[in-house]
Image (tube, helix red, strand yellow):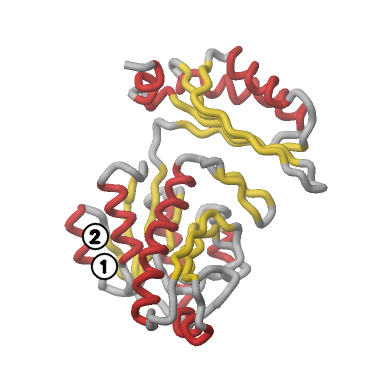
Amino acid sequence: MSIFTQYYKEKENIGRLLVKCPNKPGIVAALSKFLFDHGADIIESSQYSSDDESNMFYIRFEYYCEELLEKRSQMEGDFLELAAAFKMDYTFTYNNKQKRSAIFVSKEVHCLMELLWEWQSGDLDMDIPLVISNHETAREIVEPLGIPFYYIPANKDIREEVEAKQMELMEEYDIDLLILARYMQILTPNFVERFPNQIINIHHSFLPAFIGARPYERAYERGVKLIGATSHYVTNDLDEGPIIEQDIERVDHRDNVPMLKKIGQQVERRVLARAVKWHLQDRIIVKDNKTIVFH
C-alpha cells in the first residue's frame, strides 16, 4: 500500500489550504516550510501567477498531518503572522466533515439525477440533507433515497415569502452549498448575499450567448454549430457570476429544437457535476468575477 493510499484512508487527517495574495518571491517556500514545521506532508500542490496588472498569486495545498483535528487551532493561530507578512487571503478546510449540500430543482430533473447518481457512486463527496422544488416532479426520485423533499411553490409574486422559508431550511439543516439543478426561479439580492460563492447554477446555454428564456429556440433560429452549458457561482448580476466550468457539443442543420435540447441536457449534466465536485474538493479560488480552478 502506497503512502498516499494510506493517507486517504485517514480522511480526518487531510486538510487543504487555499491562498491568494500579491505575488512576490518566497511565497511557496514560506508556505511549504510552514506545513513542514507543523508536521504536514504535502499530497498535492497547484499554483498560478497572474500575468496581468493585478500581479496576484494563487496556490492550493492538500496535505496530510497526523492528529490534524487536534492541531488545527494551533496551526491556524500560527499562520496569522505569515498571512500578514504576505497580505494573504486564505482558507483552511478539513476533510473530516462532508459539505452539506441542498439541491434546488424545478420540473426538469436531468441535472438532479446526475448529481444523485454521482453522489451514490461516491464521486461527489457530500451530504445531501434535503431537496427543494417548486414542483412535485422530483419527489418520487428523491424520497426513495431517504432524502427529505420540500415542495415550496414559487413565483415572482410570493418570492420573498418563499425565500424566507428556504433560508429557514438552510439554517435548520446547516447548509454549506446550494446547487441550482435547473431551478427556474430568480433569487433576490437578499438571498444571494446570504450565501456568497456558495450557490452554484447551471445555465442552459453557452454564456454569454442566448441569455434568458427560450435559448434553444433562439439558437436554432441562428443556426448555431455549437451547443453548450455554463456552471457558475450566483451573484446579483443575472447569469453573470464567476464561471466555474463550461463545455460544448457540435451540432448541425439536421438537429431540430428537441434534439438540441437533448444534447444540451447532456452537456448541462456533466458541467454541473464537475463544478460541484471541484467546489467540494476546494479547488476553486474566486477573484473578482473570475475563478481560478485547480483541476
Report the side of 129 relative to 219 (left or right).
left
Mark 2–mark 1 Cα distance, whole angstroms, equals 6 Å
From this viewpoint, which residue is outermost toward the bottom?
221
Kindly identify the residue that appears in the image at 78 percent across and 47 percent down.
Answer: 52
From this viewpoint, which residue is outermost toward the right?
53
Quick one: 69 or 41, which is closer to the camera? 41
Kindly identify the residue that appears in the image at 66 percent across and 38 percent down.
Answer: 48
Helix, strand or loop status at disc 2 = helix
Where residue 39 sits in the image (x, y, percent)? 53, 13
Q: In which quadrant will I find the N terminus?
A: top left
Helix, strand or loop status at disc 1 = loop
Label ID, residue 142? 2
Q: Is residue 113 above or below residue 188?
A: above
Task: Tell me whether the residue at label 2 lies in contact with that at label 1, contact meaning CB atoms closer than 8 angstroms.
Answer: yes
Q: Label 2 sits on what residue type?
A: Val
Q: Quadrant of residue 242?
A: bottom right
According to the picture, the residue beneath numbered tag 1 turns out to be 138
Where residue 273 sits in the image (x, y, percent)? 40, 53
Where residue 227 sits in the image (x, y, percent)? 47, 70
Kindly identify the residue that appears in the image at 30 percent across and 65 percent down.
Answer: 150
Q: Is residue 191 above or below residue 219?
A: above
Where residue 33 sits in the image (x, y, percent)? 65, 16
Q: Label 1 sits on what residue type?
A: Ala
Q: Quadrant of residue 5?
A: top left
Kindly identify the residue that appears in the image at 61 percent across and 46 percent down.
Answer: 292
Report the side of 29 relative to 230 (left or right).
right
From this viewpoint, which residue is outermost toward the front?
253
